[in-house]
Image (cartoon, grey):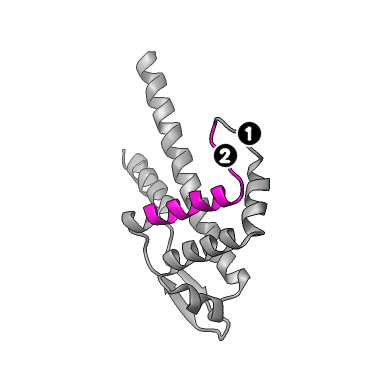
Amino acid sequence: MTENIDNQIKQIDEIIPPDRVLKTLNGENVKVPLITLGKELKILRKFFEILKSGGYKDATGENQSIDTILLNALCNNDGNKLILDMFALIVGKPPDWLIENVDITSMAECLLPFFVTRVKALTKVMASITDMGMDTLN
């Protein structure tokens, strides 16, 4: 029984990322604040706006691959501004400060774990829901 609880605790620890630190161009370490639910929703809204700026169309239109959409978003001013805005929300610093103090590598090191953690969590939740549904049918 204890092993099962310990396993559940470990899974929660994997979903909730450890404290993140952003290294600035001058070597300063800035602690990235925890993401509240309200902030998370604002960040996801920016992410959907990024997809839209990259050419994503709804189910009634002809959709492009996610690679093409993200590449298009990275290559236009609207997409770049939205990515910077999303990064600013995550870090808790104004976009102008980020432009002057952070390089693209540090930005990627901050953004990628954020999204990987969310995708992992969503995948686990969806698997649990599917498993519960199958148990109910059997």
Q: Is residue 109 above or below residue 16?
A: below
Place residue 79 in its image quadrant. Answer: bottom right
Name the residue at 52% across, 66% down.
84
Q: Position of residue 113 (x, y in %)?
A: 52, 58
In this picture, residue 111 sits left or right of residue 44 = right
Residue at figure coordinates x 54%, y 61% from the top left? 83
Q: Is residue 16 left or right of residue 60?
A: left
Q: Could you say which is closer to the camera, residue 27 or residue 73?
A: 73
- Please report whichever mark, 1 or 2, sits nearer to the chain's N-terminal start: 2
Whether residue 24 is in magenta: the answer is no
At a point 43% along the width and 27% down the height, the residue shown is: 130
Q: Which residue is mark 2?
A: 57
Q: Amino acid at mark 1?
A: Glu
Q: Would residue 47 be counted in the magenta stretch?
A: yes
Pinpoint residue 132: horizontal percent, then vertical percent. Answer: 37, 25
Circles 1 and 2 in contact, beta carbons < 8 Å? yes
Circle 2 residues within 10 Å: few <14, some 14–19, many ≥20: some
Vertical side of 118 occupied by 74: above or below: below
**Segment colored magenta:** 40-59
Q: Which residue is mark 1?
A: 62
